[in-house]
Image (tube, helix red, strand yellow):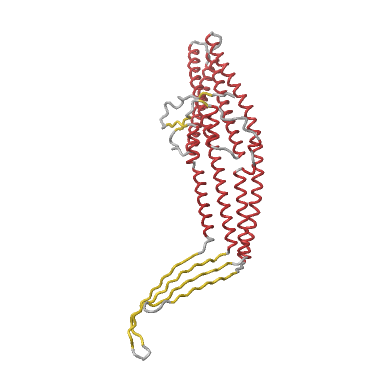
Amino acid sequence: MNVRLRLDSTIFADHSAPQRLVTIDEILERADAVNPQLLMQRAQTDVARAQSYQSSLDLFPESSLGVLQKTVDGTAQGTGGDLVDVDYRSYQNSVWFGYRLNVASQIFSALSARDLLLEQRMNLVTIRQQALAIAVHRYDNLMVAAVGLSAANRSLRDHLQVLDITEERKALGLSSDLDVAKARSRVGSLRRSAAEAHQLYTTSSTSLAVWVDIPPEELVLPGSPEMYPIVNWADTSDSEFELSNHPRVVAARHAKNAAGQGRNAAIADLLLPEVDARIISTDLGIVRDSLTSRHDAIVLLNWTVSAGDLAKIRGTQAKARREKLAWKLTQQEMVGAYVSARFGFLDSEERLTGAKDAHDAAIAAQAAALAAYENGLISIIDVFDAEDQLAQASLDLALAIADADSRWIDLRLAQGNLTKEAIIEKVAENH
């Protein structure tokens, strides 16, 4: 479907605020790189990665190296009862390797930390897709606001002319005071509408700027002179939806697995012994004497039982049950979201088709009104009414285009395969 809606590039020609032209490609690049929520999730993923690494390192033994040197200088009573000078140095070098932990519990803890890291990675995928989706929504809202502002300004200009014509006709005795009052009332109403449209546009600009880290004091302008849908109604194949591979489902599965490993770690911590293994090598000596060495190896098994350990098991079991239910619920939600998004996307084609037909009819009606005016068949007021209808049809078409884009984005989100490259590809195909 070839749908094109020309944007008015002059709506902010006299605006004093700094202006910035942005294309959809630039918006997507910024959303994928500097969106605050995405940066926050990346930091959260880094934290989970560090915790997983630390949990893995806890499986390795501890070690220490110690050196003790002692110097004695003084007198001491010898074997014959006489005092003799004492001057010697002694030293003690020791190397200690220790391994003290509940091995099974630590292995389960490391596996849990690993699953938590994988969960955060999947959350990162989800938030990246959401960041792209919101960027497209807000860019479309900006273009809709531009169409609405252009229509409001044009209607205001037209009805200001109508007011001038009505006042001239009144001076000639061809219009009444009531006609002038109606024209002025209409102009006042349109002034309010134009102000509201301007406020809506600046709000849309600020919303988009904040999302992609553009200074909000800059007025964002669409970089494209036309608004057109990026959708492809062939993107509804059931083969594209694989529930088990959806990022949110995968994240929920890793959260479930992490909770299960945490429960196993708590049980192992209670039921299995803690291994305390030590190897100590010590060298003893006096400078003028022979060296002596000592090597010790110690292995201990410790069981510790406490009420706190029992409570910890109950807590981890409850968490494991909760995460399992959350995983099942996420699967149900994703199936429902996909079915809803699929039907909503298909319905958007009908709405867009109807809006395009109405817009084409409004263009034809406006052209016919101009021709009739040139032939003296209707007044300029009738022409302006036709232009008002065209402005409304343009706004309806812009809303239909934005709705079609939104439905397509929602469908790809429900499928779990929305990417920056896919959006840019569709934009290029429909350009």
Q: Position of residue 341 (x, y in %)?
A: 63, 36
Disc count in the image?
A: 0
Q: Nearer the viewer, residue 217 or 258?
A: 258
Q: Residue furthest top?
A: 375
Where residue 216 sits, quadrant-wise, is top left
Q: Residue at x 64, y 31 (%)?
A: 346
Where residue 14 sits, quadrant-wise, is top left
Q: Position of residue 362 (x, y in %)?
A: 58, 19
Q: In the rendered view, tell whether residue 306 sits above or below residue 9.
A: below
Q: Residue at x 47, y 75 (%)?
A: 294
Q: Nearer the viewer, residue 389 or 158?
A: 389
Q: Nearer the viewer, residue 76 or 250?
A: 76
Where residue 347 sits, quadrant-wise, is top right
Q: Nearer the viewer, residue 59 or 409?
A: 59
Q: Position of residue 84 (x, y in %)?
A: 33, 86
Q: In the rendered view, tell whether residue 182 sits above or below residue 118.
A: above
Quadrant (top left, top right, bottom left, bottom right) of the N terminus: top right
Q: Position of residue 11 (x, y in %)?
A: 46, 26
Q: In the rendered view, tell whether residue 183 sits above or below residue 37.
A: above
Q: Residue at x 66, y 41 (%)?
A: 335
Q: In the rendered view, tell whether residue 365 sits above or below residue 288.
A: above
User: 411 left or right of 9?
Assistant: right
Q: Residue at x 35, y 79 (%)?
A: 88
Q: Residue furthest bottom?
A: 80
